[in-house]
């Protein structure tokens, strides 16, 4: 594994020098600016208008409702952008690069295929972690500065978003061993979409108290733990919110998220290891 | 000392297709062997098995005594793929530095400068790969293959993108490698080039070696041509050993002899005869 740091360095330089990375940064700046504008206007509306009589009567804290909904939206945006970045950094690492002739000169060096794959994963995870934390931090600062609201938990959701993106990076690396770059990109986003849909079904199931929908969401969260991590993060931002405000939040698009439970992190680690072992085994047997 | 490259009973099947059907081949230390054959004959598959890029279905392959594909084998060899690309964002110097790190070479800047000079790219040290011509990239590929002073080189079509000047540079480079004792397996379609530089050739057809030896051993006499007063006379089928008797006979019969040439089959003729109708 002595080649891992060399591959990490190579992949990090590649990440920074490829033009697509600039596009991601520009789009991220646009997303953050849009979020700032939305938060500014939303909290202005909260400050300038009286809460609806029913909400006032029920004791719903409209600032918390607005802040948590906005921040939940920003977490979804951050996860989506992180997934885009993770996929773009990893989707062509094996088959795509082999088809273009980029991989063979590296693989014949005496570092081993495992070092190459592990190095690429670590580099992608490092870039995505920095990216997700930066976007998360920017949105947190915007929410606080425009509406004087901050989530009940700050560190936990951030870590869970980074872990969710790392899971996507690992799945994309595994896919890159067997699929062409285009097919892998499509597959990664399909899987991501499937996870989100299952999560939303779970939220609907909570409100409607539907066991079937809750079971679908639970099984999906085990199969695709990035969704469970995202849901747990969403749940954590209003962990201390109670009463009618909590009930109102649950009716919104980001309020019905369920906690992942004590096995979420151990399972995430085990899942990453399983995906990694599968990718290494497939890569070791692959003819280039 | 073990041979630079040894292959015994090598078989590779892709589903129902047999790419290699039991190949035996040796490349000795410091030897330059040309691997010839039509498209689809199995040349690149053989080279890829040697590099550890493709797994053999049966048989054995060794590089400098180590099992092909093992870390020891890969540390002893260099490789230039037929279809390769380097990241466009790297400069020539950065690319070689990356391969030095991957190969565990301690050659540093001195080795990089020497390799770039060897392939005629000393002025392109800071040029990005994306700004290089295909020929420059191919020469950079050869420099990359030489990182870490390998004992054995797999060169898969190293001159396919080079102009005549570039090919001459590579020929000179191969001569230099021979001088340094580096063994080379040269996979090429350019018969004239192989004939010029290789100690030995192996011709692969439909996954099997169909001819192997020194070009001079493979060549057969074609006839003896003699320039006499009345023009040129051809003694078809005669060999080198018969030339003195032919000349003596002509002189005895009163002919004036001005020149004698022993004609032999060219490598192209040997190749075409060996591969038969496998010219796809």
Image (cartoon, coloured by chain):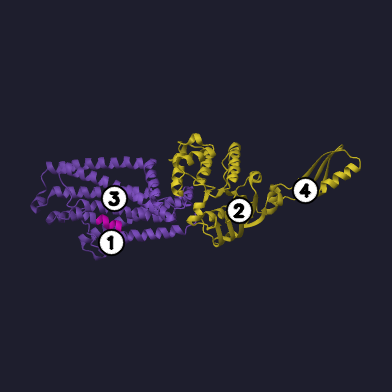
How many angstroms separate mark 2 from mark 4 (CA)? 31 Å
Query: Which of label 2 and label 4 is nearer to you?
Result: 2
Q: Is residue B24 above or below residue B81?
A: below
User: Which residues are the magenta region?
Assistant: A225-231
Looking at the image, can residue A253 be seen? no
Label 1, on which residue? A266
Q: Residues within 10 Å of mark 1 (few under 14, many from 20)?
A: few
For the view shown, which residue lies furthest in the left direction? A57
Distance in Å between CA atoms under marks 3 and 1: 21 Å
Q: Which residue is mark 2?
A: B28
Q: Which residue is mark 3?
A: A79
Task: Chain B: give its colour.
Answer: yellow
Q: Is disc 1 placed on a helix, strand or loop?
A: helix
Q: Position of residue B165 (x, y in %)?
A: 60, 36
Quadrant housing residue B168 = top right
Q: Is residue A229 magenta?
A: yes
Q: Residue at x 61, y 59 (%)?
A: B23
- Say left or right for A2 vs B169: left
Q: Are marks 2 and 4 on the same chain?
A: yes
**Letter of the purple chain:** A
* Residue at position x 72%, y 50% in the image: B219
- The numbered mark at residue B222 is 4
Residue A203 image offset from top left, x and y in percent = 23, 58
- Label 4 chain ID: B
Q: Is residue B122 above or below residue B33?
A: above
């Amino acid at each position: 594994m002595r080649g891992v740091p060399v591959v990490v360095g190579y992949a990090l330089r590649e990440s920074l020098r490829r033009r697509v990375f600039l596009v991601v940064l520009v789009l991220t700046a646009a997303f953050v600016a849009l979020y700032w504008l939305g938060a500014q206007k939303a909290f202005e509306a909260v400050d300038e208008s009286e809460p609806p009589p029913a909400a006032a009567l029920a004791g719903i804290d409209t600032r918390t409702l607005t802040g948590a909904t906005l921040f939940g939206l920003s977490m979804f945006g951050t996860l989506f952008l992180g997934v885009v970045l993770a996929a773009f950094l990893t989707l062509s690492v094996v088959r795509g690069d082999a088809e273009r002739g980029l991989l063979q000169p590296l693989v014949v060096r005496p570092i081993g295929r495992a070092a190459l794959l592990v190095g690429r994963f670590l580099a992608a995870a490092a870039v995505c972690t920095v990216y997700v934390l930066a976007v998360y931090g920017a949105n947190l600062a915007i929410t606080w500065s425009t509406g004087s609201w901050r989530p009940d938990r700050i560190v936990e959701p951030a870590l869970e978003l980074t872990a969710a993106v790392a899971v996507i990076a690992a799945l994309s690396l595994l896919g890159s061993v067997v699929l062409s770059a285009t097919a892998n990109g499509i597959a990664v986003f399909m899987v991501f979409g499937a996870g989100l849909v299952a999560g939303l079904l779970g939220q609907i199931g909570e409100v409607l108290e539907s066991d079937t929908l809750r079971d679908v969401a639970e099984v999906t969260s085990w199969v695709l733990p990035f969704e469970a991590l995202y849901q747990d993060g969403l749940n954590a931002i209003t962990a201390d919110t109670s009463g009618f405000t909590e009930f109102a939040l649950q009716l919104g698009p980001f309020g019905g998220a369920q906690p992942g439970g004590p096995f979420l992190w151990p399972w995430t680690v085990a899942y990453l290891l399983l995906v990694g072992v599968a990718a290494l085994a497939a890569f070791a047997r692959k003819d280039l | 000392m073990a041979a630079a490259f040894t292959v015994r009973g090598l078989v590779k099947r892709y589903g129902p297709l047999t790419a290699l059907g039991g190949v035996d081949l040796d490349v000795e230390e410091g030897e330059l062997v040309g691997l010839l054959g039509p498209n689809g004959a199995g040349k690149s598959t053989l080279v890829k098995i040697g590099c550890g890029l493709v797994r053999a279905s049966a048989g054995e392959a060794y590089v400098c005594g180590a099992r092909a594909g093992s870390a020891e084998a890969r540390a002893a060899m260099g490789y230039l793929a037929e279809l390769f690309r380097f990241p466009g964002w790297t400069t020539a110097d950065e690319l070689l530095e990356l391969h030095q790190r991957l190969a565990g070479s301690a050659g540093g800047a001195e080795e990089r400068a020497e390799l770039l000079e060897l392939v005629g790219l000393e002025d392109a040290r800071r040029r990005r790969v994306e700004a290089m011509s295909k020929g420059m990239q191919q020469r950079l590929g050869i420099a990359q293959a030489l990182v870490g002073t390998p004992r054995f080189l797999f060169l898969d079509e190293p001159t396919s993108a080079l102009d005549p000047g570039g090919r001459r540079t590579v020929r000179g480079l191969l001569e230099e490698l021979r001088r340094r004792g580096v063994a080379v397996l040269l996979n090429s379609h350019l018969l004239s080039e192989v004939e010029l530089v290789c100690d030995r050739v192996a011709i692969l057809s439909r996954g099997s070696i169909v001819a192997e030896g020194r070009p001079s051993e493979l060549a057969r006499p074609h006839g003896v041509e003699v320039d006499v007063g009345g023009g040129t006379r051809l003694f078809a089928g005669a060999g080198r050993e018969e030339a003195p008797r032919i000349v003596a006979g002509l002189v005895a019969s009163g002919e004036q002899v001005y020149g004698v040439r022993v004609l032999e089959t060219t490598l192209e003729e040997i190749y075409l005869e060996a591969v038969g109708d496998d010219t796809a």
